[in-house]
């Protein structure tokens, strides 16, 4: 059903092209597609790969282990869409490709949206896993799937642990569950629930809505966190509208904002630490020889784009970690829908008509 939906949307897109469209293909030429698929894939070639596992709340068991390009191709056949997938691309790799097309100094791409992940350009020699011939450039792209990072050095709270245990993928994507947009609001809900139960944060009874998983979406948290009114009116309105908690005091509203700030500060600082990890791995974290190449990091995803406090905290932390001198050489840029554009460019590179 998922792939039929995608094929159906492609059919609608094709039908919307007019006769005079300047991008209309000459008769007989097959359309080609860059397929951004933002899940962990065992990439078998540029245009095939099998799904390793779902993340971010997707769960379609019969897809695991299947070639996602073959599945999309079958769905397109069913819908009479004559198109070939020329490139299968993770969103981080698409963002890296799109960013690099615009600016040759782009070496890293990071997604901070529903999920989180990063990709970067590595020296082929530094990849022990790779046994094939080295590309002429001497470089390869690594899709890190950093969302799945976990470590005994990464302290988890009881809120992280219960969120994980109740999720569709317990034990997996631990870093993602601490830093990405799908989960920040849910961490907030869990904290508020405990404070309501144990410290009567919202009065004598626990507001029933607070029991529902994922009622507090991250964009609502963001709206409350950015409330600049003196009486925190937005916080009051959201608590009423979403959690059905009327008449909160200013002190309670302040507490809610403070918790938003704690959750976001932790997430953004961890994301910045992840970026520093990449800079270290590629030797761009210090000015040993007086100079390092300019390094641009292409950022995409709704969390980074819209959650200003998160973005600011991430940027400040990165500068704090690398220091002022180095900060001049490292730049973050917003690459809006960079992944879609990058996938299209990669599909063009691998066109059957080249
Ligand atoms: C999840 C996926 C990963 C993707 C990221 C951002 O972590 O596993 O493939 O890049 O979300 O969308």
Image (spheres, rainbow, N blue to C red):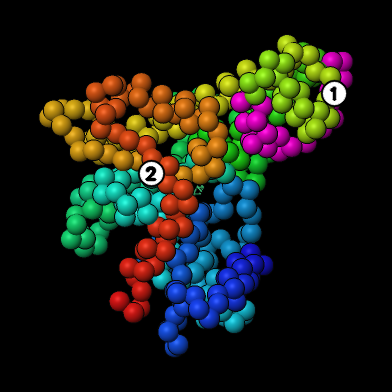
Examine the rendering and report whether any part of residue 190 can be seen: no
The location of residue 146, given as percent across then percent down, is 44, 42
Q: Residue drawn 43% across and 58% down?
A: 341
- Apparent side of residue 7 relative to residue 34 in the rendered image (left or right): right
Considering only order in the chain, which callout, 2 or 1, is on the residue closer to the N terminus? 1
Q: Nearer the viewer, residue 212 or 299?
A: 299
Q: Residue drawn 84% across and 19% down?
A: 247
User: Element type at marker 1?
Assistant: loop
Q: Residue furthest top?
A: 251
Q: Which mark is residue 298?
A: 2
Q: Residue furthest right?
A: 205
Question: Around disc 1, counting alpha carbons within 10 Å, would you say few (fewer than 14), some (14 to 19), or many (20 or more)?
Answer: some
Q: Is residue 221 magenta?
A: yes
Identify the residue under disc 1: 246
Q: Residue drawn 45% across and 74% down?
A: 22
Q: Which residues are magenta?
A: 203-226
- Apparent side of residue 286 relative to residue 33 in the rendered image (left or right): left
User: Element type at marker 2?
Assistant: strand
The location of residue 102, given as percent across then percent down, is 32, 52
């Amino acid at each position: 059903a998922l792939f039929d939906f995608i094929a159906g949307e492609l059919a609608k897109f094709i039908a919307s092209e007019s006769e005079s469209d300047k991008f209309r293909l000459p008769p007989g030429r097959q359309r080609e597609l860059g397929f951004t698929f933002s899940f962990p894939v065992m990439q078998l070639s540029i245009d095939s790969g099998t799904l390793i596992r779902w993340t971010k709340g997707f769960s379609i068991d019969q897809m695991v282990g299947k070639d996602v390009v073959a599945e999309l191709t079958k769905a397109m056949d069913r819908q009479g869409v004559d198109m070939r997938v020329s490139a299968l691309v993770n969103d981080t790799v698409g963002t890296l490709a799109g960013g690099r097309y615009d600016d040759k100094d782009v070496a890293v791409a990071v997604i901070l949206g529903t999920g989180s992940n990063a990709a970067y350009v590595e020296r082929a020699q530094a990849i022990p896993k790779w046994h094939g011939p080295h590309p002429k450039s001497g470089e390869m792209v690594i899709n890190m799937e950093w969302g799945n990072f976990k470590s005994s050095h990464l302290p988890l709270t009881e809120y992280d642990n219960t969120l994980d245990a109740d999720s569709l993928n317990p034990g997996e994507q631990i870093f993602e569950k601490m830093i990405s947009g799908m989960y920040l609001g849910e961490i907030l809900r869990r904290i508020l629930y405990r404070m309501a139960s144990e410290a009567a944060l919202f009065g004598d009874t626990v507001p029933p809505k607070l029991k529902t998983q994922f009622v507090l979406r991250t964009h609502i948290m963001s709206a409350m966190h950015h409330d600049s009114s003196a009486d925190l009116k937005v916080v009051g309105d959201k608590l009423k509208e979403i959690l059905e908690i009327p008449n909160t005091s200013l002190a309670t509203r302040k507490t809610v904002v403070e918790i938003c700030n704690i959750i976001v500060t932790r997430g953004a600082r961890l994301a910045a630490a992840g970026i520093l990890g990449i800079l270290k791995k590629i030797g761009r974290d210090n000015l040993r020889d007086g100079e390092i190449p300019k390094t641009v990091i292409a950022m995409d995803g709704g969390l980074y784009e819209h959650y200003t406090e998160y973005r600011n905290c991430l940027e400040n932390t990165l500068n704090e970690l690398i220091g002022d001198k180095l900060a001049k050489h490292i730049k973050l840029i917003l690459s809006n829908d960079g992944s879609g554009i990058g996938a299209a460019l990669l599909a063009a590179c691998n066109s059957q008509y080249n």
